[in-house]
Image (cartoon, helix red, strand yellow):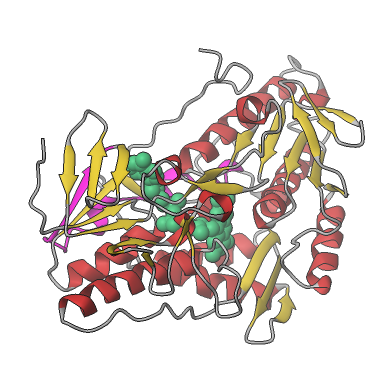
Amino acid sequence: MTGRSRGNVLVLGGGLAGVACAHRLGDEGIGVTLFDRNDYHQFQPLLYQVATAQLPAEDIARPHRVIFHAHPTVEVRTVHVAEADVANLRLTLAGGETVAGSHLVIAAGAQPEYFGVPGAAEHAYPLYSVSDAERLRLHVQDLVHGVAEGELAEDALDVVVVGGGPTGVEISGALTELMAALAAMGRIPRAGRVVLIDRGNNLLGAFSAKSHRYAHKRLAKQGAEPRLGTGVAAVYADRVELDDGTVIPTRTVIWGGGESAAPVVQAAAGLKTGHGGRVDVLPDLTVEGNPHVYAIGDAANIPAAHGAALPQLGSVAQQSGHWAAGNILRVRNGQPAKPFHYKDKGIMAMIGRNAAVAEVGKHRHQVDGPVAFAAWLGVHAMLLSGAHSKADAFMAWAWDYFDRDHAATVEWSTTPKRIAWGDEAADVPHISVDRRDPATAGSS
Ligand SMILES: Cc1cc2nc3c(=O)[nH]c(=O)nc-3n(C[C@H](O)[C@H](O)[C@H](O)COP(=O)(O)OP(=O)(O)OC[C@H]3O[C@@H](n4cnc5c(N)ncnc54)[C@H](O)[C@@H]3O)c2cc1C
């Protein structure tokens, strides 16, 4: 059954890209239907804070209906999209309903990419969604309790992180701080090891040599063990095997090793996909041969001025969503679509409290420490602004987080310090966590 008129713009995915697109169209009174399997928008840059109990999951997941409450032309549907039919501008929803629109905007984001490493999909913990972060938090919490109560050996807390990019570095930094704090408080006999594996020879590979050294030094100082120049050969429930033959016993492998486009994107008939299974888009963000179909954010390979594709970053997602909406509006008004122009906000990573690194400006000027944190804060407040109007609440929480003495304030068994968003009690997202142990996942 086709349940909708062809008038609406269909936006598949309510992440940074989809929300930015729907917002701009909604501002102009254009009819939009936004589809997401979750009833909330999630803010990935703060996932590792949820995974390490620094923030409750609700703080980084904002219900779509709250985001669009002042946009009557934006309809939100919480449903899994099973198929995208590009030629017919149509989506098939779980349950079989089909919905056709005037335009299709593909903003379905990405999924973890395991590169065929045996056991990784079954046993590793990805960190891509709020429910991933919650699952990891609950798993580590169980291990901490087990060790604290003497039911598990001390080494049950040893962790292996795969991937030395921003995700791997940030979660390693936060975990070493957490472990050190728990040990300092006497909750556990010793801090769990945090071994960070990367095939390359540097951490934060996309950054400059100065940042590589900074990240390595800071992480090592915090107690992490970067192990570079070797990859992961196989992951098991109780150990990891590396390419060089080393075996590291661990119950917790965190996968920050890469991502590829969401399954619905990779399976869509008629879409030209390239590197990472992402949609190769034209400079105006449309797909070749169909000017009514756009792909944006992590689902797309967006050409950069210097030839390569833009990186999978929040600012790229948000700006491309805004731009795609602008092009839809332009074409409706009889003007040509314009090539996307990305305003580069720089690249940055938080290695720990008081330890951030940023490369900003045309010449990628490198800064670290509080100045880098201020840059991180500015960019992330801008990213959050699509979902929240209270940037000052985020700023206040973040400076407090950055400054706080971690060891004194691990709120492991109590409620972590919330961001004062001032939400109504009813504004809660419905977050469900698949608590299956990765050891048994996939076996049912
Ligand atoms: C751990 C981590 C940390 C990061 N840190 C930073 C950072 O510090 N700074 C930065 O700039 N960027 C960071 N990024 C990258 C940034 O978060 C992403 O580039 C950005 O969120 C991509 O936005 P998106 O809208 O394209 O995709 P997403 O935010 O992934 O949104 C896609 C949406 O599509 C929905 N969806 C997918 N498939 C379906 C389907 N079949 N049916 C229904 N709905 C579907 C999903 O539920 C999701 O809501 C980080 C990413 C990760 C994973």
Q: Is residue 320 above or below residue 128?
A: below
Say whether residue 139 is left or right of residue 84: right
The picture places residue 309, in percent across and down from the top left corner, at: 57, 67
Number of marks: 0
Q: Residue at x 42, y 77 (%)?
A: 340
The foreground one among 204 and 181 is 204
The magenta span reads 50-79
Asked if one can make out residue 392 in the rendered structure from this viewpoint, the answer is no
Considering the image in quadrants, where does the N terminus appear?
top left
**Extreme front residue here?**
289
Does residue 287 show up? yes
Q: Residue at x 27, y 82 (%)?
A: 336
Query: Which image quadrant is residue 289 in?
Result: bottom left
Front residue of 382/153: it is: 382
Q: Is residue 54 magenta?
A: yes
Q: Which residue lies at the image location 55% right of the left edge and 75% below the top edge?
A: 304
Left or right of 106: which side holds 406?
A: right
> Considering depth in this image, is 71 or 141 the residue closer to the camera?
71
Asked if the magenta segment contains residue 136, the reply would be no
Q: Which residue of the protein is positioned furthest toward the bottom in this rendering?
A: 362
Q: Relative to residue 360, is residue 161 drawn left or right? A: right
- Which quarter of the picture shows residue 322? bottom left
Q: Quadrant of residue 269?
A: top left
Q: Position of residue 273 (x, y in %)?
A: 48, 53
